[in-house]
Image: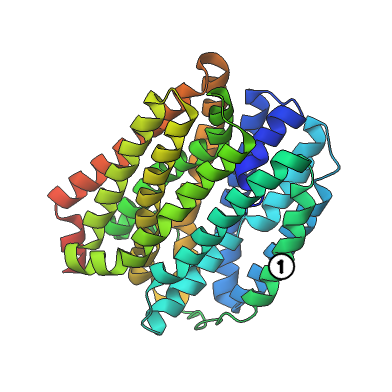
Amino acid sequence: MGMFLPFLSVYFRQDLGFSGRQIGILSLIQPLLMMLVAIPAASLADHRRWRVSLLQVGILGAAIMLIVAMFPRSFLLWIGCRSLMALFAGPTMPLADSIIARMALTHRLNYGSMRLWGSLSFAVMAAGCGLVWEQVGLRPMLPLTGLALLLVIIWASLLEEGPPRNPDAPKIGMRHILQNDMGLTVLTMTSFLIGASVYMSVVFDGIYMTHLGGTQSMIGFMFGLTAFSEPPTMHYSQALIRRFGGPQILLIACLLMVTAFVGYSLAWEPWMLLLTAAVKGLGFGLFWAGNVRLTSERSPEHLTSTVQSIVTTAAFGVAPIIVSPISGELFDAFGPRSIFFATTACTGGAALILIIALARGVFRRDAD
């Protein structure tokens, strides 16, 4: 993902000439399809014990569409291509997170210590490919990413399927979470706000860097620094949760991200974004590792993919659907800096929700 994700909006803007509104529409497709397919696919995977198989199918489909994506040049064709890509990719993240988090609990391993390798590889590829794309252009990144993604299918085959779903167990969905588990409700709400801020940042970080005078290589280094700063907090997330408590660690993570986005909003030189991106990575790495672990701990073992898909969809499905068109309009009307005032508000809202939940003893009562 580090090969193309940091540069996709720049490709749309510079190579294809799409407007901020068009970029916002294209960025809306992935979360919309995730919202539609992730939860049903995860529920089917739990019920049929097809978790690994559906993960592999999703990766394969996304890889093929990335290879095909080098050809369309018009906005309408890209809508179709992005839709097919998102259809396959939508279930992969919650399926992978739920499988690996459950394996970590089963084998008494630190989920954060495994998840950090994704951040490290993303960082290496983002920084390295930024230098390459600056020399050869952005168009080759799509098919090369698709070919590289095919390798993931092999590694995914080594994952453990996990326990079967109990046919007598009640179906679990958003209504169940909202009505029966306030702790999961808080995790879902904060995930929604963090997902909104991260998605806006991912879409417009590269454009903001070029707006301040940065180059393609600086875009790669910016995304690379974000990813490089995630592993330390991911690695120590389990120890920090044991020492201070999971919700308290999520609050610290949110405050780190608030600090980062305030820095984004105030930056006037491109090098400043490198520093704020590193702080953002520290916060997001701590938040997501803690969030996935807490969600997995609160989920019935046979429904872990379903519950994880609900929380993940809130972050990377529902939230982007709402903020994508808004962020596109903000960009066209007020410029890229306005995007980061919005991300500051979202992360601040997540921190406020956690503060209220802790003050009311939501997680303590659930534990009791």
* Residue lying furthest top: 333
Does 337 sit left or right of 41 as displayed? Answer: left
Please rate how many residues cluster around mark 1, counting C-alpha atoms within 10 Å: few if below 14, some from 14 to 19, many from 20: some
Q: How many marks?
A: 1
The quadrant holding residue 159 is bottom right
> Nearest the camera: 234 or 364?
234
Q: Is residue 233 above or below residue 153?
A: above
Q: Is residue 205 above or below residue 332?
A: below
The quadrant holding residue 288 is bottom left
Q: Position of residue 196 (x, y in %)?
A: 45, 40
Residue plotted at (42% across, 77% down): 104
Give the residue pinned by disc 1.
57
Q: How is the image coloured?
A: rainbow
Does 226 sit left or right of 35 as displayed? Answer: left
> Nearest the camera: 318 or 265?
265
Which quarter of the image is occupied by the N terminus?
Answer: bottom right
Q: Position of residue 4 (x, y in %)?
A: 66, 48
Residue plotted at (34% across, 71% down): 297
Q: Is residue 77 above or below residue 120?
A: above
Does 165 sit left or right of 194 as displayed? Answer: right
The answer to whether residue 325 of the structure is visible from this angle is: no
